């Protein structure tokens, strides 16, 4: 038969499981994990102390147990605040916790009333549950929305339950009650109350997992140095655009952009300055391409720009804008000499039935022609084909 003691022990087991799950995320560096882990460890001790009512001295099973239980929800809240990058109002949490614990002691030693002790603790719990619900935003990243919504809803429901418990017990304060009473409503409130922590921790674990997945996906799809889409993301986009262009018969252009004499820049100014040039390149290339174009770092000092819905003229125009924008002198500090750099660009347009690899090869040949033609220029595979070879590459300076 279900009774309050077995509910307590089941919840303790839940908290142990949650602590183990949280430990598996310990290496993830997700903000809030430490506080959530501490909350669950403390909850296990508090629940065991609650379960020992009548066996251990009252000071342990009432004041110490309630003190720990109060601290668990405060720690959960602190974890959620840290998780979303907000400061933790430590003094406020502490003041509320101390006041609640003082009320517990008053309703034990001065006026022994279990219902009023429940009112005090549930009021604190309800306030913090509502604070958690209000603190958690609707995140812009769609992948994070479900776990955030789950936690917000769980916190709101738990807030309502604790508030009802406080009101109900407040009204029933005169009626005699025993802790671990097996009446239906006591069991109901008791169960819901003790399940608050596992439910919120489940939300916290889901939020942490979603964040780890989102960060991993971001890292895989972006180049760490420049922030531009990565080679992997580029080929995924290329596959999509290639399929779309073939389906609709729309034009797809490709630019391959390579920094001229980049090795010399590294040798002259140092590798760190070379890195700055790559970042500068991405910033300025992004400014002159169209919104629908997709600029990615393929590796080293080589970049690619996908041009959906473009014809040859558009592709040449975008390429020339990029070349001109990147014919730059980068000023790194007030007293340093500017670092001049230029790029060469190979352009190619997707031909009917052509595989994307074929387009890459032709753009690369055009890039080679631009280098051979003297660098800081644009060469087009189409123009070269019309002119019948590398000699036909255009010099657009
Ligand atoms: P070209 O005009 O023919 O393209 O000559 P280049 O010197 O630019 O070409 P090369 O392939 O000889 O040299 C590329 C250099 O880019 C060599 C490599 O050390 C450097 N490099 C590759 N990745 C990075 C990076 O992330 N940061 C820096 N600073 N240098 C890099
Ligand atoms: Mg180069
Ligand atoms: Mg290169």
Image (spheres, grey):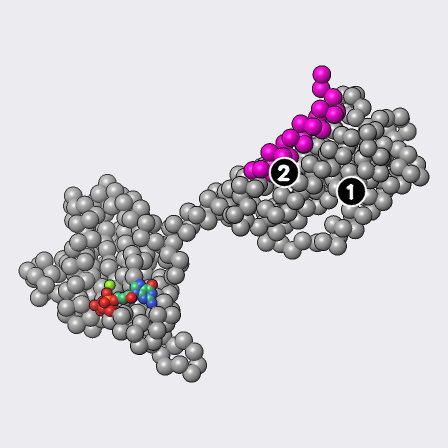
Residue 199 in view: no
350 and 45: which is toward the camera: 45
Which percent across, then down, holds residue 135? Answer: 64, 47
Question: Which residue lies under the disc numbered 1?
Answer: 67
For the stretch drawn in magenta, what is the main secondary structure? Answer: helix
Which percent across, then down, holds residue 54? Answer: 83, 29
Residue 186 to residue 218: above or below: above
Which labelled disc corresponds to residue 200? Answer: 2
Which residue is at 27% across, 51% downward? Answer: 308
Q: Residues within 10 Å of mark 1 (few under 14, many from 20)?
A: many
Query: Element under label 2?
Result: helix
Quarter assignment of residue 14: top right
Q: Are marks 1 and 2 in contact (CB under 8 Å)?
A: no
Which percent across, then down, holds residue 33? Answer: 59, 46
Which residue is at 22% across, 64% downward? Answer: 345
Which image quarter holds the N terminus? top right
318 and 126: which is toward the camera: 126
Residue 363 to residue 372: above or below: above
Highlighted magenta segment, given as a residue range: 1-21
253 left or right of 6?
A: left
Residue 92 to residue 20: above or below: below
Residue 252 in view: yes
Quarter assignment of residue 335: bottom left
Of callouts 1 and 2, which one flags the residue occurring earlier in the amino acid sequence? 1
Residue 70 to residue 296: above or below: above
Q: Residues within 10 Å of mark 2 (few under 14, many from 20)?
A: many
Give yes or no for residue 317 being in the magenta stretch: no
């Amino acid at each position: 038969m279900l009774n309050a003691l077995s509910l307590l022990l089941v919840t303790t087991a839940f908290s142990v499981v949650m602590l183990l799950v949280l430990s598996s995320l310990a290496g993830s560096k997700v903000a809030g994990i430490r506080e959530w882990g501490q909350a669950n460890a403390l909850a296990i001790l508090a629940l065991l102390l609650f379960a020992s009512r009548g066996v251990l001295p009252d000071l342990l099973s009432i004041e110490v147990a309630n003190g720990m239980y109060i601290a668990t929800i405060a720690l959960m809240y602190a974890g959620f605040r840290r998780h979303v990058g907000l400061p933790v109002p430590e003094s406020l949490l502490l003041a509320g916790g101390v006041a609640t614990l003082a009320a517990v002691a008053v309703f034990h030693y001065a006026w022994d009333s279990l219902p009023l002790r429940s009112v005090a603790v549930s009021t604190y719990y309800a306030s913090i549950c509502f604070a958690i619900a209000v603190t958690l935003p609707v995140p812009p990243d769609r992948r994070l929305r479900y776990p955030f919504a789950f936690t917000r809803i769980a916190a709101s429901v738990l807030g309502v339950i604790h508030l009802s418990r406080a009101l109900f017990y407040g009204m029933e304060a005169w009626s005699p009650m025993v802790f671990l009473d097996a009446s239906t409503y006591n069991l109901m409130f008791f169960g819901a109350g003790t399940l608050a922590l596992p439910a919120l921790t489940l939300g916290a674990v889901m939020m942490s997992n979603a964040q780890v997945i989102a960060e991993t996906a971001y890292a895989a799809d972006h180049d760490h140095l420049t922030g531009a889409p990565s080679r992997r993301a580029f080929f995924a986009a290329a596959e999509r655009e290639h399929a779309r262009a073939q389906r609709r018969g729309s034009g797809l252009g490709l630019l391959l952009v390579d920094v001229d004499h980049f090795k010399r820049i590294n040798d002259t100014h140092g590798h760190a300055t070379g890195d700055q040039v790559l970042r500068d390149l991405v910033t300025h290339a992004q400014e002159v391409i169209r919104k629908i174009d997709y600029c990615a770092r393929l590796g080293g000092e080589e970049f690619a720009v996908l041009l959906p819905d473009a014809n040859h003229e558009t592709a040449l125009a975008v390429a020339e804008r990029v070349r001109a924008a990147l014919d730059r002198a980068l000023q790194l500090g007030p007293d340093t000499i500017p670092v001049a750099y230029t790029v060469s660009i190979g352009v190619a347009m997707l031909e009917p039935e052509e595989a994307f690899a074929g387009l890459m090869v032709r753009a690369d040949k055009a890039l080679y022609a631009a280098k051979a033609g003297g660098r800081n220029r644009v060469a087009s595979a189409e123009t070269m084909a019309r002119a019948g070879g590398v000699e036909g590459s255009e010099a657009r300076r």
